[in-house]
Amino acid sequence: MTLPVDKSILHEIVRVVSARSKVPERVAVRGRNYLITYLDDHRQRLEDALRRHDVDRVNMLYGQLASKVKYQLMRGGIGRERSGRKGSRAKLQPARQKRRGSAVKKIVALKKRPSTGKKAASAKRRSSSRAARS
């Protein structure tokens, strides 16, 4: 059984091999880079079949791809996060600060609870004045 991510990685490998006639070491799927490791001599056989333009052998090797390939998610994603530009880092920092800010707001809200007694006291005053009106 192949998972949706596995399937999309396998389709990307086949697409790259078909388009470039080269067996990829890395593929990008859904904005993530994966390092591809080929078991046994599968990569060598695939490159040999591409050199010979043996379509039947290439298709047979595509069929074995699911059992002959392992992949590993690489850290950093695609170029944008690796570039080191301040702009790409600045996009990540506000989200972190926002999360921290919500935690701070909760703490501040908890500290302010004793002050709600004043509101209760003012509500009591209002209720007595309403009673006086009726």
Image (cartoon, rainbow, N blue to C red):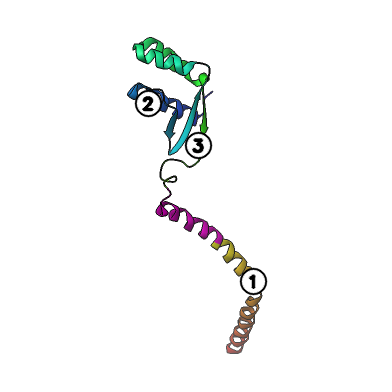
Task: Classify residue 63 by image quadrant.
Answer: top left
Task: Classify residue 127 by image quadrant.
Answer: bottom right
Q: Sort mark 3 into few (<14), some (14-19) or many (20+) by Cα contacts within 10 Å.
A: few
Q: Which mark is residue 16?
A: 2
* Residue 38 in the image, given as x and y percentages of width and height: 50, 22
Q: Which mark is residue 49?
A: none
**How far is the residue under mark 2 from the one under mark 3?**
18 Å
Q: Earlier in the sequence, mark 2 or mark 1?
A: 2
Q: Earlier in the sequence, mark 2 or mark 3?
A: 2
Towards the viewer: 98 or 48:
48
Q: Sort mark 2 into few (<14), some (14-19) or many (20+) by Cα contacts within 10 Å.
A: some
Closer to the camera: disc 3 or disc 1? 3
Mark 1 — residue?
Answer: 111
* Residue 73 in the image, given as x and y percentages of width and height: 51, 35
- Tag 2 secondary structure: helix
Q: Earlier in the sequence, mark 3 or mark 1?
A: 3
Residue at (53% x, 19% y) in the render: 39
Residue type at the position of mark 2: Val
Q: Is residue 95 magenta?
A: yes
* Residue 19 in the image, given as x and y percentages of width and height: 33, 24
Residue at (34% x, 24% y) in the render: 20
**How far is the residue under mark 2 from the one under mark 1?**
59 Å
Q: Which mark is residue 74?
A: 3
Residue type at the position of mark 1: Lys
Residue at (43% x, 39% y) in the render: 31
Task: Classify residue 49 by image quadrant.
Answer: top left
Q: Which residues are magenta?
A: 84-100
